[in-house]
Image (tube, rainbow, N blue to C red):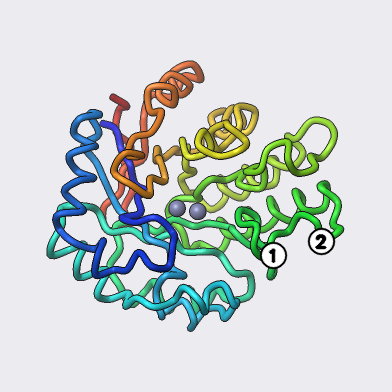
């Protein structure tokens, strides 16, 4: 079995409306691309910030600009007009756990993907509101990032932790901390184990300036040694990106002795052999 659980049915521009992209024909384009690449198990995980319900959680100006769609319409569309698993990419906002839980508990997900895209008001992966250039040292940005990722797992809100080293996304165009990065990963791995969450191997990093999968090889090795279940995803925003660089990802997993992937239904997890 191969999975692609972190799919977006549209790219992130605001003008890509739900009316245009949440259609059975568009979902079918993703399904066809997946079939060509031998991927049987597909699910969508749209960004929470594209839905008005996001503003019950957080009112960052970036979210205010994008929060236009109805979350229940999305759930209804996926359940009734597609054969895709229903997920959500739900940002972790520290201190807003109860509000996040309220939004999640009101709907029936197959899985919830947890992401850290912001540290307080500063963004890790967009230039707008970007954290780089605010004067914080790379050591402090990385420490805060991995502490927040660990906290997101411990919140118990999530089934899968997405792109778990997103802080590296800009590669060498942003300052890097010196020395062995494993000191940053350790508390995160411990939190994933304690919380029993699955961690995403995301091929999307190969499309970004960093040009490497999430998580990095040393981080992935620590996760494998610890026995963390892994979920495989491309974070595709177009049908062409479905299963992006999966051969490379499967090869990497095999080289580390990983034989199974996490599969989800109604927020229950099981492991299935890769392939
Ligand atoms: Zn993300
Ligand atoms: Zn995503």
Viewed as shown, does residue 75 lie left or right of 207? Answer: left
Q: Residue furthest front?
A: 15
Q: Quadrant of the N terminus?
A: top left
Say how many tags the image has: 2
Q: Position of residue 165 (x, y in %)?
A: 62, 43
Q: Nearer the viewer, residue 162 or 265?
A: 162
Asked whether mark 1 and ligand 1 are closer than 8 Å, the reply comes as no
Q: Mark 1 falls on what kind of element?
A: strand
**Alpha-carbon neighbours of circle 2 within 10 Å: few (<14), some, or many (≥20)?**
few
Q: Position of residue 244 (x, y in %)?
A: 38, 33
Q: Residue at x 73, y 34 (%)?
A: 182
Q: Position of residue 116 (x, y in %)?
A: 58, 58
In the drawing, what numbered circle is on residue 97?
none
Viewed as shown, does residue 70 lie left or right of 141? Answer: left
Q: Mark 2 falls on what kind of element?
A: loop
- 106 shown above or below 42: below
Q: Nearer the viewer, residue 223 or 3?
A: 3
Q: Residue furthest bottom?
A: 56
Q: Quadrant of the C terminus?
A: top left
Q: Are marks 2 and 1 in contact (CB under 8 Å)?
A: yes
Mark pair 2, 1: CA separation: 9 Å
Q: Earlier in the sequence, mark 2 or mark 1?
A: 1
Q: Residue at x 69, y 68 (%)?
A: 120
Residue holding disc 1 = 122
Q: Residue at x 24, y 70 (%)?
A: 19
Viewed as shown, does residue 212 lie left or right of 253? Answer: right
- 198 shown above or below 243: below
The quarter of the picture where residue 21 lies is bottom left
Q: Nearer the viewer, residue 228 or 36?
A: 36
Residue holding disc 2 = 134
**Alpha-carbon neighbours of circle 1 within 10 Å: few (<14), some, or many (≥20)?**
some
Q: Position of residue 123 (x, y in %)?
A: 65, 61
């Amino acid at each position: 079995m191969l999975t692609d659980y972190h799919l977006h049915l549209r790219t992130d521009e605001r003008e890509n409306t739900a009316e245009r992209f949440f259609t059975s024909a568009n979902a079918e384009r993703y399904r066809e691309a997946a079939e060509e690449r031998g991927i049987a198990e597909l699910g969508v995980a749209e960004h929470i910030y594209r839905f008005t319900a996001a503003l019950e959680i957080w009112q960052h100006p970036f979210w205010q600009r994008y929060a236009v769609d109805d979350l229940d319409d999305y759930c209804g569309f996926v359940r009734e007009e597609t054969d895709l698993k229903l997920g959500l990419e739900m940002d972790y906002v520290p201190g807003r756990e109860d509000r996040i839980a309220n939004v999640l508990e009101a709907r029936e997900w197959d899985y919830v993907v947890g992401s850290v895209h912001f540290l307080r008001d500063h963004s890790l992966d967009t230039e707008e509101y970007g954290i780089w250039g605010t004067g914080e040292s790379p050591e402090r940005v990385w420490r805060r990032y991995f502490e927040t990722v660990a906290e997101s797992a411990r919140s118990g809100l999530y089934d899968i932790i997405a792109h778990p080293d997103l802080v590296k996304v800009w590669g060498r165009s942003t300052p890097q901390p010196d020395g062995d990065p494993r000191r940053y990963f350790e508390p995160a791995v411990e939190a994933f184990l304690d919380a029993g969450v699955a961690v995403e191997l995301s091929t999307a990093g190969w499309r970004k300036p960093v040009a490497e999968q999430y998580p990095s090889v040393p981080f992935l090795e620590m996760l494998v040694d610890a026995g963390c279940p892994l979920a495989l995803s491309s974070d595709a925003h177009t049908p062409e990106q479905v299963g992006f660089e999966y051969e490379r990802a499967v090869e990497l997993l095999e080289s580390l002795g990983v034989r199974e992937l996490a599969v989800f239904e109604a927020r229950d997890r099981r492991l299935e052999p890769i392939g």
